[in-house]
Amino acid sequence: MRRAWLLVLLAAVVWGQPGKPNPPATGQIPSAQIIAALEQVTSWYRDVSALTQSSGSSVDPLLLANTQHNALKALETAFDFSRAEAAYKAALRANPDDAAASGNVPGSEDMAQVAARAAARVSGVETQIADLETAIDKAPAAKRPTMEAQRDEMKAQLDLVKEIQKSVQAIESFVGTNNSGTGAAGKLAGQINDLERTVPEARRTPGQTAVPAAPAGGQNAGQNAPPHPESAGIAGLTSQVFALGKVRGDLRDLIAETDRLLKQLESLRTPTLAAVKDSIRQADDLNAAAQGDDVAQLAAGRKDVLALTARFKSISTVMVPLREEQLLVESTRGNLVEWGNVVNQQYHAALRYLLLRLGMLLVGILVVLLVSAIWQRATLRYIREPRRKRQFQLLRRVVVFCMIGLLLVFSFVTEFGSVATYAGFLTAGLAVALQNVILAVVAYFFLIGRYGVRVGDRVSISGVTGEVIEMGLVRMYLMEHAGSGEDMHATGRVVVFSNSVLFQPQAIYKQLPGTNYLWHTCTVVLTADSNAEVAEATLTKAVESVYEQYRGSIEQQHAEFERSVDVEMVAPRPECRLRMTNAGLEFRARYPVEFKGAGETDTRVLKALHDAVGAEKELTLAPDGAPKLQALG
């Protein structure tokens, strides 16, 4: 007997001392508090399950699986504890003497008690029938009819009590399903069943443990692979920082919720500990009373000991799952704290590398801008030719744009394999949509080449003649000229052509590279009786006398042209011919003129030819044979 009390005392010491006032000695917990605690642990389990299933952070999959498993086991033991408490309440109501001894007034009878009594009646009637069957076999023949009649009556009663049992079981099932009943214990059991239906994974038969679903990381290890912030770009690091920050916040909230749950479980443990203390006190009292010699008192004490033993067994069925639930919740909290430490390390690492990437990007852009400024100052200082200066400025802008673009691409994206297909489709689409622009850009590099078009050149494109005033990356601009010969003049309009005209069937006419002169033709017609030899010599001399005034500039341009093409060519000079026609002797002179002074040069040539004919008596102009410009060569 003393050994049993020592075990009871040891259980009380292991459970610890409560820090709150002692509740009623029965150890009963209010039904509303049990349901509130059950709802709280159900909500907590759902939060744990949702976080382990949806978290994208990289932690040990075993840690996630263990966390979810412990949470599910805690939920299962919470339902076990609630049912044990409901059964304990029902046991107290079923034993009025025990309830009165403990200070509890029994309530109205619930359907669980009715079902138990119906089952007891069925068992009792079956026992009586079995006893009668045995007695009939041994009874004398005279008593058998009476005993058989009693047996038949008992069988009829058995059918009746079985029907009553079926009806009670049906009513009990209906009451439990719909959370109704005549007693508080029946209502509590119905509420517990309703809550269990909302969490299907927690429903299990006795002796069976539900297996939690594997976390997302266990199903797809690729999604839960450890992040590598040292190799990620700014876009990936930003995504990691925001994702890990969200997980950190969720873990903090979940740990706080776990702490609140532990406080709630501690408040549920207090009545049970008080009941254990009360049992120890009563055991001490009974032990003292058992020292007497009164037979009646000893018999009553034995009855009290048996009742106290049954009561302690009921309390232990409540105490064990509650303590197990506390241990599981504490273990889950430890896993959540460990998970939070891992996430904090990953968050700080991703944030550190993100700031490093942004700093490197900023430094790279500053370096490119510094090189651009130095390039621009060197171009303005050391390059004097406007055309070359514009080309270097354009090249600087293109290089700076490309370098900054590459810096942005390599900073924001590092996993190019994942975007290769997308980039291929995007490139193909842009190539189709911007084919004319691409042709214009490619043509630009041909046009500014060694024999290309320069600013100031005179060109003819698609029937339009003009002077190039600007060469852009996509377009060229011409100042339009109209007229011919000495009447060539600017119209005041600017004509814009795409550089892609270089790849069109129409030809582009331009002057020789490095030159700024044109060929003009002048014709003089003399009468047939004029002296041919004198006419050729005199008129040729007149043309050459005018050419001598600007011959040096023409020859200098020709020399530059020879250097640019690496070909030796005859220097340009006036070409004069005399031939006989139906109108008389026709003298034709073809001579180079500078573009800017072409009109003035033509005027001097015409005047020199007219004066030469007038000074020679052997030369006579034919009717309508005055010197005139016939063509632009």
Image (tube, grey):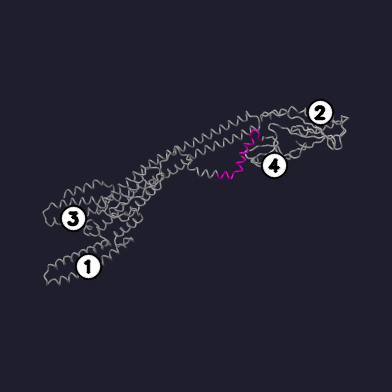
Looking at marks 1 and 2 on the same chain, the residue that comes earlier in the sequence is marked by 1
Looking at marks 4 and 2 on the same chain, the residue that comes earlier in the sequence is marked by 4
Three-letter code, disc 3: Leu
Q: State the image coordinates of residue 304 (x, y, percent, origin top left).
A: 18, 55
Residue that mark 3 sits on: 306
Please tell me which residue is depicted at 30% across the width and 46% down the height of the picture. Answer: 327
Residue that mark 1 sits on: 158
Three-letter code, disc 4: Ser
| Part of the protein shown in magenta | 428-452
Q: Based on the displayed image, in which of its 4 quarters is residue 196 positioned?
A: bottom left
Asked whether disc 4 touches disc 1, contact meaning CB atoms under 8 Å apart, the reply is no
Element marked by disc 2: helix
The chief SS type of the magenta part is: helix
Looking at marks 3 and 1 on the same chain, the residue that comes earlier in the sequence is marked by 1
Q: State the image coordinates of residue 225 (x, y, percent, origin top left).
A: 41, 42
CA gap, disc 3 and disc 1: 32 Å
Instruction: Answer with left or right where residue 83 lies relative to residue 452.
Output: left
Three-letter code, disc 1: Leu
Residue that mark 2 sits on: 541
Please tell me which residue is depicted at 16% across the width and 67% down the height of the picture. Answer: 133
Three-letter code, disc 2: Lys
CA gap, disc 4 and disc 1: 118 Å
Residue that mark 4 sits on: 462
Quadrant containing the C terminus in the rendered view: top right
Between marks 4 and 1 in the image, the one whose residue lies nearer the viewer? 4
Element marked by disc 1: helix
Q: Is residue 81 magenta?
A: no
Instruction: Answer with left or right where residue 294 lies relative to residue 504.
Output: left
Total marks drawn? 4
CA gap, disc 4 and disc 3: 120 Å
